[in-house]
Amino acid sequence: MKKSIFRIAQMDCPSEENLIRLNLSEISGIKHLDFDLANRTLVVFHLENLAQIEKALIDLNLGSSLVSSDNTSQKSFNEESDQSKILWTILIINLAFFFVEMTTGIISKSMGLVADSLDMLADAFVYGISLMAVGSALSRKKRIAKIAGWFQIILAIIGFVEVIRRFITGGILPNFSAMIIVSIFALIANGICLYLLQQSRSMEEAHMKASMIFTSNDIIINLGVIIAGTLVYLTNTRFPDLLIGTIVFVLVIQGAFRILKLSK
């Protein structure tokens, strides 16, 4: 058996971990995947199919590179028996905050919150695809991925159009207090998701370093909306909100294209 270590520069949240699991699930001969989000590394225990694994990782455009590949005598691995339960919990959290942020974003006139809600929806899509595809045919997984990816792109484009409209025509200032308060709760929710995923691996990893949490794109986006809300208050302009909304919409579309790769 081979033990291959990959450095994945843009693997900084559980959603991307799940995308990688989905993409590699089509490859026979893979015995175990060991993810380290903190150090952005993936260890693959597999048979003689390194080139296929490497190509599948590169195709996701997450900055994957092979660090080493050596023979190993390891044959047993600690598998998570509660994986499905954990994924369902995280899926529900992400869906709940999608509705919370979308609703408050519309009411408070904040494009930052609307965009962040789509980022939550994107994560929910990834976990949902994984759960619905368990025990299903590959064709079903691909159909779900295609629908989810295009739906996400359409929503993001609508968001872009609204950002442009507000930039040109102006409008009411977004409610900065709603932006800050809701984003703080979203920040806590994302932290809980990361904690649950780490807890499912081992008790030792459950007590992860704080730096691991703050490497997540989701956490950075939440902080960005909080900062934008603060700048809206300080500058009395809507532009910080429009800027963070634009940035997050770009990230959402990038994530959508990664999901669409699973449908090919």
Image (cartoon, helix red, strand yellow):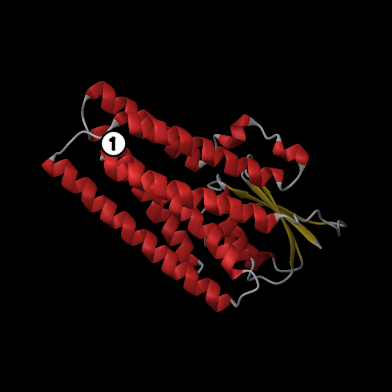
Q: Which residue is rendered at x = 21% and y = 33% of the image?
A: 173
Could you tell me which residue is drawn at 63 percent across and 71 percent down?
A: 26
> Which of the 4 quarters of the picture holds residue 31?
bottom right
User: Seen in the image, is 53 located left or right of residue 156?
Assistant: right
Percent x, y of residue 235? 23, 23
Q: Is residue 205 above or below residue 28?
A: above
Which quarter shows the N terminus? bottom right
Q: Is residue 209 above or below residue 126?
A: above
Q: Residues within 10 Å of mark 1 (few under 14, many from 20)?
A: many
Q: Nearer the viewer, residue 192 or 41?
A: 192
Residue 149: x and y in percent read 42, 63
Residue at x 68% of width, y 35% of height: 208
Q: Is residue 166 left or right of residue 126?
A: left
User: Could you tell me which residue is drawn at 37 percent across and 63 percent down?
Assistant: 151
Q: Across the whole image, how many numbered discs are drawn on residues?
A: 1
Where does label 1 land, which residue?
Answer: 241
Q: Position of residue 142 (x, y in %)?
A: 51, 73
Residue furthest to the top in view is: 234
Judged left or right of residue 79, residue 162 is left
Residue positioned most to the left:
169
Amino acid type of disc 1?
A: Asp
For the question of whether residue 105 can be seen, the reply is yes
For the residue pair 14 and 193, the one nearer the viewer reads as: 193
51 to 94, vertically: above or below = below
Q: Secondary structure at mark 1?
A: helix
Query: How far from the left and from the top, in percent, is residue 168?
Result: 13, 43
**Could one spot residue 63 in this view of the protein?**
no
Pick the residue in front: 26 or 161. 161
**Relative to 49, 110 lies left or right:** left
